[in-house]
Image (spheres, helix red, strand yellow):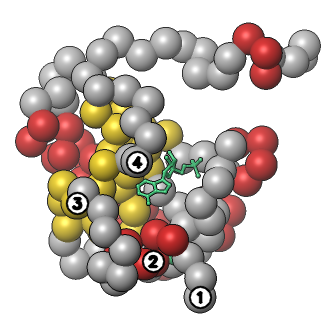
Amino acid sequence: MDCLFCKIVNKEIPAQIVFEDERVIAFNDINPQAPHHVLVIPKKHIATTNEISDEDTALVGRMHQAAAEIADSLGFAQDGYRSVLNCNTHGGQTVYHIHLHLLGGKPLGWPPYTEKLKQPL
Ligand code: AMP
Ligand code: ZN
């Protein structure tokens, strides 16, 4: 399978890994959108959040728990952060192996989309 993030899991391509356990791995985003921008991914290949099965629910919970642990270890858990999972085209997904964006280190704007993408309801 030709998946960029599986290659990072398998250490076939380099990444700045900040956390790893048996089920998840986390590394710095190559194009950071905040002072801290870490991607937390399952080692298991799951293409999109639409493909999360019953057997994956604990794994997805572990992604969130690991994100909180990373935020704590990097010193921004108490100030706060945002965790985001983009799905498919409208969600802005570009890599089809689910990944939790952990963004922190400054106050983040809301809503997260830009003016030019806003559509009337
Ligand atoms: P998304 O648009 O939600 O699919 O997010 C994909 C993210 O992966 C983007 O924020 C990219 O900057 C990031 N990315 C792409 N290639 C790499 C890489 N080789 N190492 C680290 N992050 C990457
Ligand atoms: Zn993959």
Marks 3/1: CA–CA distance: 22 Å
Q: Earlier in the sequence, mark 2 or mark 4?
A: 2
Q: Nearer the viewer, mark 4 or mark 1?
A: 4
Is residue 98 visible in the rendered structure shown here? yes
Q: Is mark 2 within 8 Å of ligand 2?
A: yes
**Amino acid on which disc 1 is placed:** Met
Q: Quadrant of the N terminus?
A: bottom right
Packing grade of label 3 (10 A; few <14, some 14-19, many >=20) is some
Write down the residue under mark 4. Answer: 30
Q: Is residue 33 above or below residue 90?
A: above
Determine contact: label 4, label 1, CB under 8 Å.
no
Q: Earlier in the sequence, mark 2 or mark 1?
A: 1
Q: Quadrant of the C terminus?
A: top right
Q: Is residue 66 above or below residue 101?
A: below
Label 4: state its secondary structure. Answer: loop
Write down the residue under mark 1. Answer: 1
On residue 81, the disc is none
**Amino acid on which disc 2 is placed:** Cys
Write down the residue under mark 3. Answer: 17
- Left/right placement of residue 62 relative to residue 18 reads right
Residue at far right of view: 120
Determine contact: label 2, label 1, CB under 8 Å.
yes
Q: Is mark 1 within 8 Å of ligand 2?
A: yes
**Amino acid on which disc 4 is placed:** Ile
Q: Nearer the viewer, mark 4 or mark 3?
A: 4
Q: Is residue 70 above or below residue 120?
A: below
Write down the residue under mark 2. Answer: 6
Residue at far bottom of view: 1
